[in-house]
Image: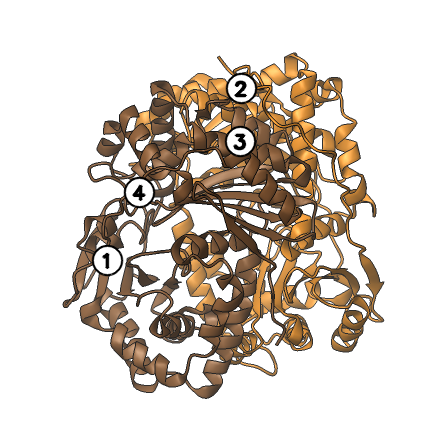
Amino acid sequence: MATRAVEVNNAVPALAPERQVTWPKRQRARLSNGLEVILVESHTIPKFHGELFFRSGNAAAIDRGTGLAEMTATVVRTGTAKRASRQIEEDLRRIGADLSSSAGADTSAISFAGLSDFAEPLLGMVDELARQAAFPEAEFERERRQKLEEVKLERTQPGFLAGERLRKVLFGAHPYAQVSPSEEQVAAYKRDDLLGVYRDFYTPENALLLLVGDFQPDAMLKAAEKVFGAWQGKKPETKPSARPANPRGRRIYLVHLPGAVQTQILAGCHAITRKHPDWVKLGLTNSLYGGAFNSRLVMNIREDKGYTYSPRSGVNAFRQHGYFSVSAAVRNDVVAASLTEIFYEMDKLRSVPVPESELADAQNYLSGIFSMGLATQNGLLSQIAVVALNELPEDYLETYRQKVRALTPGDLLETARKYLDSANMQIVIVGDRVQIESQAALFGELEVFDAQGKKLS
Amino acid sequence: MKRLQIAIESTTLANGLKVVIAPDTAAPVVTVGVYYKIGFRLEPRGRSGFAHLFEHMMFQGSANAPKMQHIKLINSSGGVLNGSTHYDVTNYYQAVPSNALERVLWLEADRMRALKVDDENLRNQRDVVKEEVRVNVLNQPYGGFPWLDLPPVAFRNWANSHNFYGDFSDLDAADLADVQAFCKTYYVPNNAVLLMLGDLKPEEGFALAKKLYADIPAGAPPPFADPAEPEQNEERRGEVEEKFGTLPAMAIGYVVPKRRTTDWCAMALLDQALHGGRAGKLYRELVLEKQVAVELDGGIEDIFGYNGPTQMVTRILHKPEYSSEQALAAFDEVIREIQENGVSEDELAQLKVKWQSDYFSLLESGHGGMPRYGLMHLLACFTLFDGEPQLVNTVLDGFLSVTRDEILAAANKYLRKEKRAIVFRRPAAAGVKEAA
């Protein structure tokens, strides 16, 4: 039995009329040097949150080295022309600020939050890191050695190993296939490589500054112009990567982790970017399938069968491609049983139209949680970042709920057929092969790897 | 500096249920929480992990909302929900569009009044909890380190020292009678606080609370075992094998002074001086300067959210070329330095600004996509432990008035070897040489 019918008790209070959701005004500006700025007021606490994005990340740096944008971001905060590492950290503390620098596949970013009273000194620090990072030799060496230990360590985490293998399988020769560098790749990093990435990526024309919080936007914009105005730099040239081949046929990849007392399942297939017209449809289909607590998959393999604590599905979007995935960490003896249910629920959505009432529930869910971001500075920042970085329409936030509500069972059936591609799902399982190999082999041609990525059979 | 004044109104119903409301119109969303004053610290002996297992059972059905309906009704109202078990409280919370306020209050009232679960539900959730323990502890590098490793070494009172996630044999032994007894003892209105935050008017919230909760009968005042620890007079050490990880690790815990004392405030700033990110003395010395450690973090976790013995804990993963004793010596040097010199005037000023800034963020911090979790948690703990939700607006003052002398005194009084416990987590994998 997959899902149980739940009779709604008559005593359950009805919903009151929905209250209006009003998204705050986004003030957009371009500084004299080409830096794009978006400012949004949110007075929940006397602080503000910000993010300085660069539209180039690890994918754009792939020819220079795997994970090189991330390494560059890491070293950015360790010294500038004016301040040594220790000074940077103390000066941040002095103004009550938090700051981090990191890179993903498509972006590099300096993220920060601080007290409104000290907005200008914090912006000054961000500008200094973006423009005058010094990449001190000793700091680079220290971070590189640190990174070596980190990449060893992550190969002991089932979740990491599953994600890494799936990305390799789905994206092949495309840069999105590379999740993290190997020890050899880290050992080969050169300070000059970091300087090159910094020079090319960290420019105002390549950047987007988002500021959300307790401030007066005109005054904040003036402060930004004053702080960042003198910074100069061109947009880097981008080299398009060849479209990754879409793997055909269901295949299964076992990453052998000796002694594992549980099996991490992660299966996925190609999907779409956020700009794709089907994005909202796939989002709703996903929330019905396994994207919410109340979803079919969670109700089935957790609440009905008790196979797992944490089943979830999701749509993961990069700038150029996307993929759909489903994950669950399950008891070793129910790997095959869990996969059967995972595919059963997928195929059911592909075969049988969703009942109207279930659709309405999912529509309410998705449109309701969409407004939660409004309540905090951080939540607002991340929603606005998604819109801006993906170049979604200006009214995306305002019209999203309408789009969700307009979908029909027919739309979902069509979407599930297109993207919950059960016949071509690539299945990764991470666990002790002795316990799970025979179960795995039931689901397709099997390849076995060790945690270092070496093929075992 | 700008202050933050949270509007708070509270009352207590005739059955003892406390109700706290913090209205705020930033978004058309309400957060509703129910906190019960029982956590894993005082769960029944022989039933380790039971408070958490019981938390799962609270989602398994009540008289008018059978299994799966609570979850379905929250999600389909456009909201998210969860629960979590802590040392001294267990919480249930949901954030929903504000038009679902009454529905959520009704659901929470229904399970407070009449939980209705059976053996099948219990078996199901026992299985789910075991997978939770596997995914978070048994099948993860450094799983449960140090929150499960340190207590059995540090403490002597079973309440503080047992396995809070639960031994599987204890989970297996738990039956429906345990569920019913625990529910009857602790899940009573006079042992709980109901919280409503966000887009609602206080009078509306109080009226609904009265309508839906006033007829839930009060229980007998719950018995609470004494969690006090005997005086510690010697350093305590223990070892745990690390099955997956590649780096040797250790955790050092010092007992924290009683909450809401001057010493406690001084200890919190001392914690900020030692653990406050990359500017903290420990990170700076062990990771940035001496480069002994690969990861270092810690502090007094959830400082406002406990009501019994707790520790300030430093968690260190260090390079395998250093022995545990060498890494510990580097740690000890930082402690010795702060015991000698305390913090400078300039440093203290920095610590206070950061503390205040962090406090604002704590109030706004979310949890699993749910806004205002932090504020809810503080309001609940200040209500249940201190009877004073308004502390949210005043508790900062104590920290901002700490002096250099008080920090120096706290360093010498509490950061003593005979007041600490250390757990070493050593990789079992070959190739890692331990000189200790």
Foreground residue among B288 and A405: A405
**How far is disc 1 from disc 3 in space, using C-alphas?**
45 Å
According to the picture, the residue beneath numbered tag 1 turns out to be B424
The color scheme shown is by chain
Residue type highlighted by circle 3 = Leu
Chain letter, disc 1 residue: B
Mark 3 or mark 1, which is nearer the start of the sequence? Answer: 3
**How far is disc 4 from disc 3 in space, using C-alphas?**
23 Å
Q: Is residue B398 left or right of residue A43?
A: left
Foreground residue among A361 and B383: B383
> From the viewer's perspective, is residue A350 above or below residue B416?
above
According to the picture, the residue beneath numbered tag 3 turns out to be B107
Label of residue B222 in the image: 4
Chain A drawn in what color?
orange
Mark 1 or mark 4, which is nearer the start of the sequence? Answer: 4
Residue type highlighted by circle 2 = Phe
**Residue B149 x %, y %:** 26, 51
According to the picture, the residue beneath numbered tag 2 turns out to be A343
Q: Is residue A392 left or right of residue B427?
A: right
Chain letter, disc 3 residue: B
Per the image, label 2 sits on a secondary structure element best described as helix
> From the viewer's perspective, is residue A106 above or below residue B114?
below
**Residue B187 x %, y %:** 38, 37
**Residue B291 x %, y %:** 37, 71
Asked if both marks, 2 and 1, belong to the same chain, the answer given is: no
Q: Which residue is drawn at 68% across and 52% down?
A: A380
**Residue B77 x %, y %:** 64, 32
Residue type highlighted by circle 1 = Phe
**How far is disc 2 from disc 1 in space, using C-alphas?**
43 Å
The quarter of the picture where the C terminus of chain B appears is bottom left
Mark 3 or mark 4, which is nearer the start of the sequence? Answer: 3
